[in-house]
């Protein structure tokens, strides 16, 4: 019993000993760091009131006019040459700015183009090569005129250098006397020639290569909102309008006087005598193909056309009589044409091509320009006057119709 009591006391000592020792120790003080507290002071906004502005009375100073000083006299600058065109041809190629353009004025690839020629080749005009007085025409406005007067107003567009040839056939373009050496035996005969061997590109190259250095045209595209059909010539719209004459076959004193003078003239009497002598020398078979004088005078009598001003005054009288001879020079040409100007009631014969298409005063110098068309020479269209003269034609190989 005693032994159990001792064991129990020892066990309790082992259990309670550490606890008693811990109670004898002094407690450890742990300090916790407290962050510093910063107080933020709120500012009260201050509203400043703007003080009223008190304007001072405005006192205008007296106006003092400076003395008038006359500027020294200055000579006006000399006027430069006017580059506005009083006349230019118009046809299916457009407005023709120059009828003797150089090939070097063109640049780029050859291309097709509209024009009166049968075979054509064109290049875009070069701004650096075309003369300045011609290049400046781009974008300008022109009035276009036909035989009876103005037909439209148009703007000039793109410029092109155009070469043309009138054949009369493709063989003649490639193997005519001025474009090909006739002694070269490699040239095919006319029967051996096959047009299928010459595509459009080859045709354009041939037209361009056989054109003289100054034988092309400088043409401008005609841009208009209305039709310009029938236009023959043009004039810069910024210039004053030209004087236009109008043709009529209405009877009038000036026309009757011209007819009476001609029918009583020695020229007509001599023509009648020479024709009757020539006709009388023909054999019976030849006479069957040639009319006698009475037939000519009846079928082709003297006729007079009058060109009138806008004030309805006769300006020109155009006279025609007789019959033109045949193609090959056979026969006797009895045709007579003349044109006279009415001046102070008198008819003054003019050295001008008869039967013009249009008559006008383009440069307003008081002298008329005559626009004519011919069929048998290179001057297909021409304008003639004392101050304006120009013509255009297209190269072709002449083939005698006889």
Image (tube, rainbow, N blue to C red):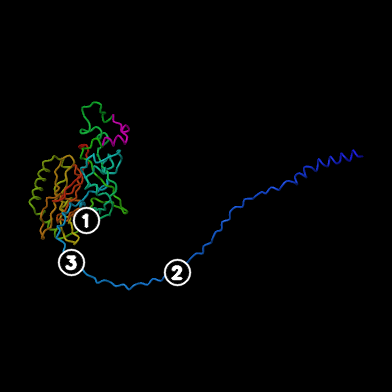
Q: Which of marks 3 and 2 is nearer the N terminus?
A: 2
- What residue does disc 3 label? 68
Q: Position of residue 13 (x, y in %)?
A: 82, 41
Q: Earlier in the sequence, mark 1 or mark 2?
A: 2
Circle 3 crowding by C-alpha within 10 Å: few under 14, some 14–19, many from 20: few
Q: Answer whether residue 285 is visible to the viewer in this image.
A: no
- What residue does disc 1 label? 239
Where is residue 171, by image quadrant? top left
Q: Is mark 2 on a helix, strand or loop?
A: loop
Residue 309: image tag: none
Closer to the camera: disc 3 or disc 2? Answer: 2
- What residue does disc 2 label? 49
Residue visible at 28% across and 35% down in the picture: 205
Residue visible at 14% across and 55% down in the picture: 367
Q: Is residue 139 above or below residue 43?
A: above
Closer to the camera: disc 1 or disc 2? Answer: 2
Q: What element carries label 3?
A: loop
Q: How far apart are marks 1 and 3 (CA)?
A: 40 Å
Confirm or deny contact between disc 1 and disc 2 (CB under 8 A). Answer: no
Residue farthest top in this picture: 185
């Amino acid at each position: 019993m005693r032994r159990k009591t001792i064991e129990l006391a020892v066990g309790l000592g082992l259990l309670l000993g550490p606890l008693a020792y811990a109670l004898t120790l002094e407690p450890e003080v742990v300090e916790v760091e407290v962050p510093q507290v910063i107080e933020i002071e709120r500012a009260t906004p201050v509203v400043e009131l703007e003080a009223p502005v008190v304007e001072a009375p405005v006192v205008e100073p007296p106006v003092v006019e400076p003395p008038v000083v006359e500027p020294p006299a200055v000579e006006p600058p000399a006027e430069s040459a006017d580059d506005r065109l009083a006349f230019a041809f118009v046809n299916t190629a457009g407005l023709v700015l120059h009828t003797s353009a150089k090939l070097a004025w063109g640049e780029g690839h050859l291309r097709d183009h509209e024009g009166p020629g049968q075979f054509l080749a064109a290049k875009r005009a070069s701004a650096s090569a075309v003369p300045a007085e011609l290049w400046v025409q781009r974008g300008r406005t022109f009035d276009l005129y036909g035989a009876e007067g103005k037909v439209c107003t148009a703007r000039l567009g793109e410029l092109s250098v155009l070469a043309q040839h009138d054949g009369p056939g493709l063989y003649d373009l490639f193997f005519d006397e001025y474009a090909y050496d006739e002694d070269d035996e490699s040239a095919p005969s006319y029967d051996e020639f096959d047009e299928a061997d010459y595509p459009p590109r080859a045709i354009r190259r041939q037209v361009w290569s056989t054109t003289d250095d100054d034988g092309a045209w400088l043409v401008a595209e005609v841009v208009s909102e209305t039709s310009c059909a029938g236009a023959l010539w043009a004039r810069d719209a910024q210039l004053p309008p030209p004087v236009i004459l109008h043709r009529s076959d209405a009877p009038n004193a000036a026309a009757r006087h011209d007819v009476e003078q001609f029918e009583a003239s020695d020229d007509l009497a001599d023509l009648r005598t020479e024709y009757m002598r020539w006709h009388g020398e023909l054999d019976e078979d030849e006479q069957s193909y040639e009319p006698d004088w009475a037939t000519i005078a009846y079928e082709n009598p003297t006729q007079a056309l009058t060109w009138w001003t806008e004030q309805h005054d006769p300006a020109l009288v155009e006279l025609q009589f007789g019959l033109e001879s045949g193609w090959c020079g056979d026969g006797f040409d009895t045709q007579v044409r003349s044109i006279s100007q009415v001046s102070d009631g008198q008819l003054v014969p003019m050295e001008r091509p008869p039967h013009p298409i249009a008559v006008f005063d383009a440069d307003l110098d008081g002298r008329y320009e005559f626009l004519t068309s011919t069929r048998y020479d290179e001057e297909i269209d021409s304008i003639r006057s004392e101050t304006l003269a120009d013509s255009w034609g297209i190269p072709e190989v002449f083939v005698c119709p006889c």
